[in-house]
Image (tube, rainbow, N blue to C red):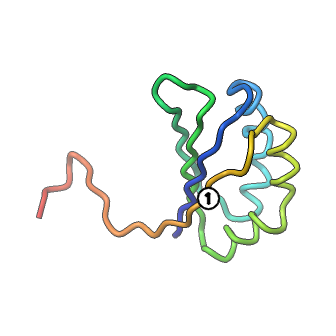
């Protein structure tokens, strides 16, 4: 599994979120396994999305082949998003003992 971290500014979070939700089917077609949404403290229009994918290949295909760029423009993404591919190397939960 691979994750994509996307950081961008939006004109209006509620409008962006509605478009993000509508685009769920397309993400799933390309192998999306879920996501986490974050907002900058004090600025709800500064959004960070952590998306999980079944493979890096499918994540790259989604970024390159889908209608993502058009959708981002339609839902009010401002400027170029910052996008990073991430490989998880460790996860810690309260139930997991520290080593």
Left or right for 2, reference 45 = left
Residue at left 73%, top 55%? 27
User: Where residue 88 sits in the image (x, y, percent)?
Assistant: 41, 66
Q: Dot 1, how many residues are within 10 Å of its Cα: few (below 14), some (14-19), or many (20+)?
A: some
58, above or below 14, in the image: below
User: Where residue 19 sits in the image (x, y, percent)?
Assistant: 79, 36
Left or right for 61, reference 3 = right
Residue at left 75%, top 64%? 62
Residue at left 70%, top 32%? 17
Nearer to me, 89 or 54: 89
59, above or below 57, in the image: above
Question: If the image is split into quadrants, where does the C terminus sit?
Answer: bottom left
Nearer to me, 4 or 28: 4
Q: Quadrant of residue 76?
A: top right
* Number of callouts: 1
Give the residue pinned by disc 1: 83
Q: Quadrant of residue 51?
A: bottom right
User: Where residue 8 sits in the image (x, y, percent)?
Assistant: 64, 43
Residue extending farthest to the bottom is 57
Q: Quadrant of residue 91?
A: bottom left
Nearer to me, 8 or 3: 8
Left or right for 72, reference 51 = right
Residue extending farthest to the front is 79
Residue at left 59%, top 68%? 54
Left or right for 10, reference 46 = right
50, above or below 13, in the image: below
Q: Secondary structure at mark 1?
A: strand
């Amino acid at each position: 599994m691979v994750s994509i971290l996307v950081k961008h500014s939006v004109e209006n979070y509620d409008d962006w979120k509605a478009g993000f939700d509508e685009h769920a089917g397309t993400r799933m077609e390309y192998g999306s396994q879920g996501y986490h949404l974050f907002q900058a403290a004090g600025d709800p229009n500064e959004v960070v999305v952590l998306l999980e994918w079944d493979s890096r290949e499918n994540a790259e295909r989604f970024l390159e082949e889908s209608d993502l760029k058009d959708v981002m423009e339609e839902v009010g993404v401002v400027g170029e998003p910052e996008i990073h591919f991430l490989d998880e190397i460790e996860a810690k939960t309260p139930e997991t003992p520290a080593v």
